[in-house]
Amino acid sequence: MAQIVAIANQKGGVGKTTTTINLAASLAVEEKRVLVIDLDPQSNTSSGLGLSAGHPPISSYELLSGARTLKEATQKTALPYLEAIPCSVSMAGFEPEVAGADPNERARILKERLPENETSGYDFILLDCPPSLGFITLNALVAANSVLIPVQCEFFALEGLGQLIKTMERVRQRWNTGLKIEGILPTMYDKRNKLSTSVLDELKKHFPEEVFSCVIPRNVTLGEAPSHGKPAVLYDVLSKGAQSYMTLAKEILAYG
């Protein structure tokens, strides 16, 4: 059975897309079969994996709307074990289209589009969520087994984290009792910066069991690789950025 992981944080610029791309690639390098579903209308994960972004002919919008099955929407990537479903700008208009449906049914749309007979061929399905706690992110939380939360090592990090955890609790109570935190991932860490170190210490103090041992550093390669349509492991495997995500993948496999 596939482990479905939502990668979510309503704050923008925390490394959510970077994490989706590079964790997926690192798990694929470990020969785990991975599917990435881009649910963010900005489509940065799609372009970062070398897929058509913005207006792909088949996207996660067609998956959620029921126009295409999971298999029909899935595309190959440059890594043999990694497949993906790109997002399109049409996703931004999906919520109004289903506004009249029953609220419980609307929350379960994505879950119903991921039947076990179609997902059983994967080890991991990573759901890249938009930077909000809206309708699409709610669907991802209802469909997921766990949530991986990237948190930038900066001043307001803990504020957004608390809001997301409250939303997760509401989802547990109403739709998905088994939803858990996969882990909290500190990103953009700079050991030379006292604020980065202070935020990391605070995260570990408040969430001692949830914070990953792996910390993602600020790294030029992680910023450059998406512009070439590649994860860091294909762009510069020896870079600190690529190696940090390989370490994260190993940690998840060891303790997941």
Image (cartoon, rainbow, N blue to C red):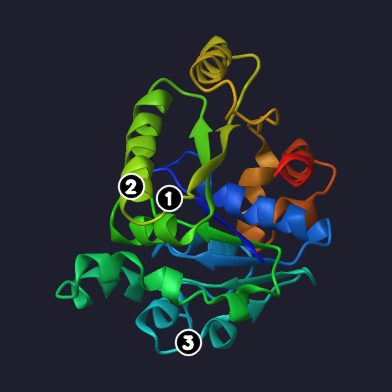
**Alpha-carbon neighbours of circle 1 within 10 Å: few (<14), some, or many (≥20)?**
some
Residue 103, numbered label: none
Residue 186, quarter of picture = top right
Distance (Cα) linking label 2 and label 3: 37 Å
Amino acid found under the numbered disc labelled 3: Pro
Residue located beneath label 1 in the image: 177
- Could you tell me which quadrant the N terminus lies in? bottom right
Mark 1 and 2 residues: CB-CB less than 8 Å, in contact? yes
Mark 3 and 1 residues: CB-CB less than 8 Å, in contact? no
Left or right position of 200 against 68: right
Amino acid found under the numbered disc labelled 2: Gln
Residue located beneath label 2 in the image: 173
- Could you tell me which quadrant the C terminus lies in? top right
The answer to which of 231 and 182 lies nearer the viewer is: 182
From this view, report whether residue 138 is shown above or below residue 1.
above
Amino acid found under the numbered disc labelled 1: Thr
The answer to which of 163 and 94 lies nearer the viewer is: 163
Which of discs 2 and 3 lies nearer the camera? The answer is 2
Q: Residue at x 38, y 43 (%)?
A: 168
The answer to which of 104 and 20 lies nearer the viewer is: 104
Residue 75, quarter of picture = bottom right
Residue located beneath label 3 in the image: 57
